[in-house]
Structures are given as structure tokens and as C-alpha cells.
Amino acid sequence: MNRHLLSAGDLSRDDALLVLDTAADMDAALAGRSIKKLPTLRGRTVVNLFFEDSTRTRTSFEVAAKRLSADVINFSAKGSSVSKGESLKDTALTLEAMGSDAVVVRHSASGAPHRLANWIRGSVINAGDGTHEHPTQALLDAYTMRRRTGRVEGLQVAIVGDVLHSRVARSNVLLLYTLGAEVTIVAPPTLLPVGVTAWPCAVSYDLDAVLPKSDVVMMLRVQHERMHGGFFPTTREYSRRYGLDAERMATLPDDAIVMHPGPMNRGVEIAAEVADSVRSTIVEQVANGVSVRMAVLYLLLGGLIDVSGADEVAA
Amino acid sequence: MMSRYVIRGARPLGGEARDLYVDGGELVEEAPAKADVIDADGLIALPGFVDLHTHLREPGREDAETVETGTRAAALGGFTAVHAMANTDPVADVAGVVEQVWRLGQEAGHCDVHPVGAVTVGLAGERLAELGAMADSAARVRVFSDDGNCVHDPLLMRRALEYVKAFDGVVAQHAQDPRLTESAQMNEGEWSATLGLAGWPAVAEEAIVARDCLLAAHVRSRVHFCHVSTAGSVELVRWAKAKGWNVTAEVTPHHLLLTDDLVASYDPVFKVNPPLRTNDDVVALRAALADGTIDAVATDHAPHALEDKETEFAAAAFGMTGLETALSVVATSMVETGLLDWAGVADRMSVRPAAIGRLTRQGQPLEPGAPANVVLVDPAARWTVDATLSASRSRNTPFAGRELAARVVATFLRGKATVLDGKAV
Ligand SMILES: [Zn+2]
């Protein structure tokens, strides 16, 4: 694997399968333990560098790192150079001085983790950058699909909603293509990027046409600012055309699953009875997120373990 | 202290080798006595280049560039005249500021500085600046531009086009529909979709180009388009010229060589306005420069302080330096590819831009009686761009590390050498 995880597109098929298999090993290793902790990354430092508030993602990485016995520093940067705060470079130099082995970064600007990777020696893990990517979300989604359906290759996956602004969609399209799933993105044309035709997926404007042949439906969150950005006439019309309610869910194949990266707008892109149904994997996705992030940290930092040193957990 | 030179064996416009004689600031018939002899064997002699689009940053951002450093870089690039854009602080929208910039150019002495006047007060696009006062000032402004901003109000643009006819001025439009490019970061296309960066669609440029061609025709004025960057703009300019309308256009060196896939690094050195486009656009721009649809190469030299580029892509300033690499990029993209000969380079980098700017003493034939504005180019040179060696105060060249063809060896401004052996005098 590369030293950094900046884009889901950086992962080869073997890399991606290794992450998923390692996540499964992590689950197995922790199953039945009263103390959910492995000594694997003892003495290593993981920095959570969050320029955007995201308690969910930050907590998930924090739990993952702690379960591997790493030291965790939460570094909430108040501003960034985008918002005229401290520059990203100065923040990077500060982290260098602290001696971090990995930096998990969330930032409102696309490409900020790429910039950071130029300035620090440790691994950079993209935990969501602007409207670009969120590769660990895609990995946890693939892991969830595999656990629920037994496979990823050959699955028909519909990704529905604001693809234009979605880092989850970009990472999922890339990773699922690598893993051999067939993706259809479904959105009103205003919420698809110009240039989407070059993506390795199909495109549809018609949710009802896509649902009956989907093994997996992934609903994307409608950001509040989009509701008033002129991308669609009203939230009500959006829900009618692109929301997943019980009636639409009934058109899915019997063993199809419904996913959502959270946080949900119940009643907008997903109805409450769908979110709470047996098809829904939303709670599992959260748990799987920890396992997958453990795997990513282990594989990126494990690759740095000095075999001549006295690291007793290098297995 | 006028210099006398015998330039031995240069090939004017790439033609037959002959000697050029310089005396009293002009080219003369016969070899002057006690002249310095310059061995120009194998070198091409061209009229000194004229840049229609240079950001010298003074007054206001002397940390990024000054008239002194910018014009030294210009001379090293073979330029004997540059047009200094109006988006300084304060804005060059009154006679006092354009005269100040003009005088700074005279004092520096590396190349002539012709200030561009703002079209609207403060570049705000709301009301006309005192265009006549700037035209009548010591700086004798003929090119007016809100560059950086588009004059997007169609009525205001119409008035500007009409008004400058009184003193034979030209409005140089930065064609960018503001609503279609809100928070735009790069060309809208496959790469912006992948990189998650807000797109700057070609139509935002082309819609303004089309509108302003029609406006210029309607009021029988002339319009010049800054840095056209798309195949569609080229088609529109070609159409307007075929109609006989008084439309001219420039292209930057970077749009002749670089494409939007470079943004995949998220390195803001590739962030520029208008953005780097696709290979199809590059091909169309080269063809248009070759057939004369695009009149001129203009650098849009836009120096920026390091801290304005060492940031997230979205936070970085737009712009690239270009004075010192312009000739070599044109040689690499146009001459080496067989699209343009050296006479063509002289036409697009000197003759036509001088004519658009109404500079009667620039862009003249290399014949006795003409001002001795001459550049000597080594067509066989190959060099690798090193940003740290730039004479500009800024380092934001997108060509760093690239090998380019041909190099400026010497520049003469009215008979005075500003560059010899590739070094500033
Ligand atoms: Zn411009």
C-alpha cells in the first residue's frame, strides 16, 4: 500500500481486499474480549486533525486508534487558510514537531490532505476533504456490503442523491469499480458533475427504474445549503422524486440492503420506516467503521515498523 | 551614452544571416565606428517583444513584484514593452496612478511600461473611470481593462466600447460571466468532477466573447479579448473576424502548453484564471495562433507571494509568472511543432501586440531607421526552468522542471542592451 490514503483510487484491488480482510481479522481478534484492545500500535501517535466538525468520524478514528493502543491527539483546528486562520502549512509543521506517525485529516477544501502530505513525514489519511473524497467511508461501506451479502464483486449498487458535492459518492464509485461491483448513480441532473460521463459507473435520473435491479441502495445526505441553492425546486419535490420511502423500498429485490453514511435527514432522502427497517445497515456501518479504520491504521503504520527494533507486536 | 553595436551574422526573422548596425538608438545602414561587436552566428533576430498583459503589482503588492523586478524579468524574456495591468492597490483608474507606473518604468529602464487603465472605478464594474484623463496623461493610455474582473454589465460594456473611440482606445475584456463561475477553481470537465473542485465552464468565457463581439460590431468600436482559453472562444473570434469586425485576441503561453490534468496534484502553481483547459482546447488555440485568428501571445504574468500559493487549492491566488519563459514556451509549442515560423513569432509577439496597443515605436521591421528594439534568440538552446533563478520577485512558474526549447540571448531597448549573454545588463 502507499504511505498515504488520500483517494480510494489509490487502492489496488489487492490493497482494498487486504484492508477488508484485515478489518475482518480485527473483528475476530476482538470478539469475545472483555477489554477491546490490541497492543499493535503501542508507542505510536495518531493525530486527528479536524478542520471541520465531525464528531462521528473523529470518534470512529479515535476509537480505532485506541483499540490498537496508539496515542491519540485530537487537534481541532479552529480556522484554516480558507477561512483566514492559521495556514495549513504552519499546522503541518506543528504536527511534525510533535512527531506524529499518522495524521487523520478532515478539511473543507478538496485536496487539503494532498497538500498536507507534501509537508509531513508520517502517513496522511483523508477523513473527508471538501467535495472530493472520503476513502475510509467507502472501505467501511464495502466491508458492510460484504458482511451482509457475502460479496462485493458483481453487486448492483445504486448511489442516490447529491453526487455533485459528495465525497462519499466519489470514493465509493472508485472503490466499488476496483472491487468489481456495478454502480449506478442516481440524481437530478443538477446534482451530477459535468464530466461524470467519464466515471466508471452508469448514470440515471430515474430512481424508480433503478431500484428493482439493485442489490444495494446507498442514500446520500442532502446538505442543508443545497436545499436552498437552486439545485432543485423544493425539498418536497426532491423527496418525491429521489427520496426512499417504504413504497419504493418494496420494489427492491428481497435481499437488497439500504445504506446511508449518516447523518440522515429523516423524511428528506430517507423515510424513518426505511432507516429503521431490517434492510437498513446504518447502525452496522458505524460499528464497521471502527474495524475498517483499525485495519487502515494498522496497515499504514505497520508498514513502518522497524523489524530490527524491539516492537513485540510486529506480527 | 548611446551604445553602438555591430550584431554580426544574425538571421532576422529566421531568414538569411546578415549584420545589424545599431547607433543612436536606431538601426542604421552602415557599421558605426567604435562599435561593440556581438557575435550572433546562429541566432535569430526579432523585433523586441510587446506584452499586452503583465501584472507588475506595484503599487500595493511590492512583496510579489515591483516595476523594477518585473521589467527586468521582461527584458530577460526579450520584451521591450509591457502593458501593466490596472488591478494594483490603489487601482490604476485615475491619471495619477497610471502616470506613477509609467514613470517607474522609465526609471527602471529595462523595458517600456505602458499602464493599462481600469475601465471602471475600482474595477467594481459600476461606473466608468476617467478614461479620457488617463488617455491624455503622460502615460498616454490606450488599452483599458478591468482584468481580474469582467466588465459584465452589458450596458456599461457598450458605453466603454463607445467612449474609447474618441481617443482610439481599446477595451481588453477579461471574459468571465461571474454568475457561472461563482467560487470556481478549475476548468469544468472530467478533472473537476474527479477532483471535487468547483468548475469554471468554457461557456462562461464564450458567452461574454460572443456578446462583446456583437456589441463591438454594433457600436463600431474595437474590442480585445484577454487570454482566450477555449476552442469555443476561438470559433467565435474567427466568426467575428470573418464578418470584418474589429476584434482581436490574445493567448497566454501556459494555455498553449498546459492542460487541466495538472491540477490533480492540487498544487496551486497550476491555479490560474482562466483555468488550464483540455488538450482539445490547446490544439484549437495553437491552430488559431498559427492562422492569425488569435493575434498575439500575452503572458498574463501574475506573480504571487509564496504564502498566497502555499495553501489549500481553494485558498490560493490565481495566476502564474510567465515573462521569462514566454518565448521558450512559444518555441516549444508553436515553432518546434512546425505551426509557426520565426517571422510568425515576431508577428504574434511584437508586431500585432504593438499595433493593438497603438505603440508606434515598437514592433517595427528590423530595417534602418527603425528604433533598435531587438531580441536575439538562440533557436537551438534547450534549458530546464528553475523557479529559484527567476528575476521576478515571485516563484510561481508552472514550468519549473520542464525542458523548453530556444532561449533569449540578448535584448536591446532603443539601442541599449538590457540583456547580454542571457543575463540582465
Ligand atoms: Zn484576466
Image (cartoon, rainbow, N blue to C red):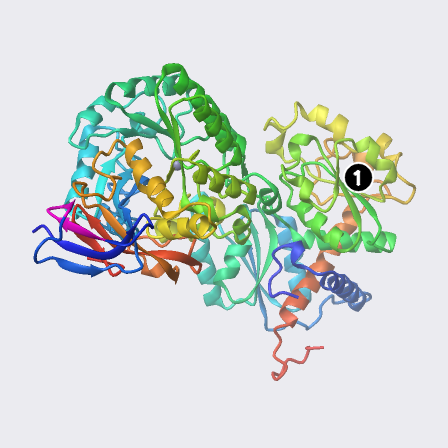
- Quick one: A197 or B418, which is closer to the camera? B418
Q: Which residue is at 50% across, 29% downward?
A: B206
Q: Is residue B253 visible?
A: yes
Q: Quadrant of residue B273?
A: top left
How far across and down, in percent of the image, does residue A232 sit?
65, 26
Ligand 1 positioned in quadrant: top left
The magenta span reads B19-29
> In this figure, what is the number of numbered marks?
1
Q: Which residue is mark 1?
A: A275
Q: Is residue A90 above or below residue B188?
A: below
Q: Main secondary structure of the magenta part?
A: strand
User: On the rendered structure, is B102 left or right of B395?
Assistant: left
Location of residue A197 (image quadrant): top right
Of residue A192 and residue A151, the one placed in the foreground of this image is A192
What residue do we see at 49% from left, 61% from top? A118
Residue kind at label 1, given as amino acid type: Ala
Q: Residues within 10 Å of mark 1 (few under 14, many from 20)?
A: many
The one of B245 and A43 positioned closer to us in this rendering: B245
Q: Which quadrant is home to the C terminus of chain B?
A: bottom left
Q: Residue B386: in sight, yes or no?
A: no
* Of residues A5 and B97, the one drawn nearer to the viewer in this rendering: B97
Residue A275 drawn in magenta: no
**x and y, in percent, of residue A288 in the image:** 75, 55
Magenta run includes residue B21: yes
The image shows residue A237 at horizontal and vertical percentages of 72, 24
The chain letter for the residue carrying disc 1 is: A
Query: Taking B340 as reference, is B143 left or right?
Result: left
Give x and y (percent) for residue B417: 18, 53
